[in-house]
Amino acid sequence: MAACALRRGLLSTFSKYNSNKHAHRIISLADSRFEMYRPQLECRACGIYGGAEQRRLMSSRPEGKILETVGVFEALKQHGKYETGQLFLHSVFGYRGIVLFPWHARLYDRDITPPMSDSKPEPPGAHGSKEVKGKTHTYYQVLIDTRDCPHISQRSQTEAVTFLANHDDSRALYAIPGLDYVSHEDILPYNSAEQIPIQHELFERFLMYNPAKSPTFIARDTLKAWQEKNHPWLELSDVHRETTENIRVTVIPFYMGMREGQNSHVYWWRYCIRLENMGNEVVQLRERHWRIFSLSGTLETVRGRGVVGREPVLSKEQPAFQYSSHVSLQAPSGHMWGTFRIERTDGSHFDVRIPPFSLESNKDDKAPPAGYTF
């Protein structure tokens, strides 16, 4: 993030005038309008720690340099989960958000060597022969503050959650702007005295302010009904992760539904991918190479420049890039895997493995997603 470079500059500037080493002021949000004092929180993007005391999160008004209080950081939850209504900053992309509800996913981390038993097998033709054991991990459905969307759009898509149109004669996709899936370790929790701290068209439809509760925002019946109706289309079940030469790739697949074509059925999935540079070297994603295996017996190869029309640079200041795409098969299940071609600053290349992941359809018939328009 650009915010990380500002963090370092401010830290070096303010440390000259501040004898208390636990009160560093740093920029944290992607739009660089935020100034904060942090309670033992580390930015995963730049590795900077804040002080040991609970500190205020400040924001400058757009029309001037006057600071106003946004909220107060809370302690990280090492155990348990964050509840509906929890305000947070995203530790990688820096946006403000609020938790709608948690998901329990199975994380298949190929960086960890598991016992041979109770492991997930490789798909046909996938690279390597490593078996990976899944472990339960908490993810969250969240709303992104729309004020931050323009500032993260080059690093993370803000319309990544999509649905198939519920008209049989339409192939259109519907997107919900500002809806994201966030891992537990991505959350830097804070609280706020504002009754509307997050700007999003669904905020007041889904949540209500209740100062007697903690967090002070609770789910409305509309959020509960929306979650229940759209559970099969929103549910996050499997997460796949692998690191090659300090570049970590995380993949989350979602089943979207089936379309009836002429004499055939077409099954659709979306998949969300995050690339993270865990090292110090500046690199750039140049090409993608996919292998797509269908239960019908077909094996397709896809090559292309970049991803979603971009060739993102991953550096210590901007270490992550996240995007979503879609795939269809003429079978109810299959597998995908592949590589990203990465270029170093000296012009040399290396391939980063994309962990193999399953494409599984929901076996029972589900109604089309509902409630995504109001």
Image (cartoon, helix red, strand yellow):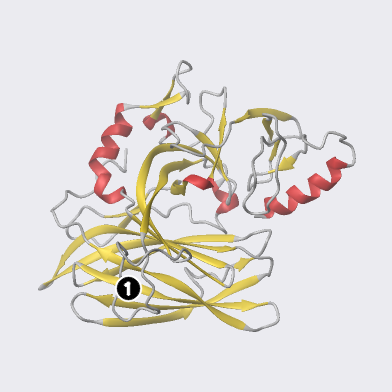
Q: Quadrant of the N terminus?
A: bottom right
Position of 68 with respect to 99 (left or right) is right
| Tag 1: amino acid | Glu
Query: Which residue is the extreme one toward the left?
Result: 263
How packed mark 1 is, by other alpha carbons closer than 10 Å (few <14, some 14-19, many 20 or more), is some
Nearer to the camera, 115 or 165: 115
Secondary structure of residue under mark 1: loop
Question: In the displayed structure, would residue 80 be above or below residue 288?
Answer: above
Q: Quadrant of the C terminus?
A: top left
Q: Residue 14 sits in which quadrant?
A: top right
- Which residue corresponds to the image point at 53% horizontal and 69% vertical from the top-left? 310
Picture coordinates of residue 203, whole percent (x, y) = 43, 33
Question: In the displayed structure, would residue 8 be above or below residue 206?
Answer: below
Q: Residue 300 sits in which quadrant?
A: bottom left
Picture coordinates of residue 180, whole percent (x, y) = 44, 48
- Which residue corresponds to the image point at 57% horizontal and 52% vertical from the top-left? 152
Picture coordinates of residue 210, whole percent (x, y) = 44, 19
Query: Which residue is the extreme one toward the top?
Result: 212
Position of 183 with respect to 232 (left or right) is right
Question: In the displayed structure, would residue 296 be above or below residue 206?
Answer: below
Nearer to the camera, 342 or 244: 244
Picture coordinates of residue 114, whole percent (x, y) = 40, 63
The residue beneath circle 1 is 122
- Which residue corresponds to the image point at 73% horizontal and 42% vertical from the top-left? 26
Nearer to the camera, 137 or 309: 137
Q: Residue 272 sits in which quadrant?
A: bottom left
Question: In the displayed structure, would residue 127 be above or below residue 51?
Answer: below
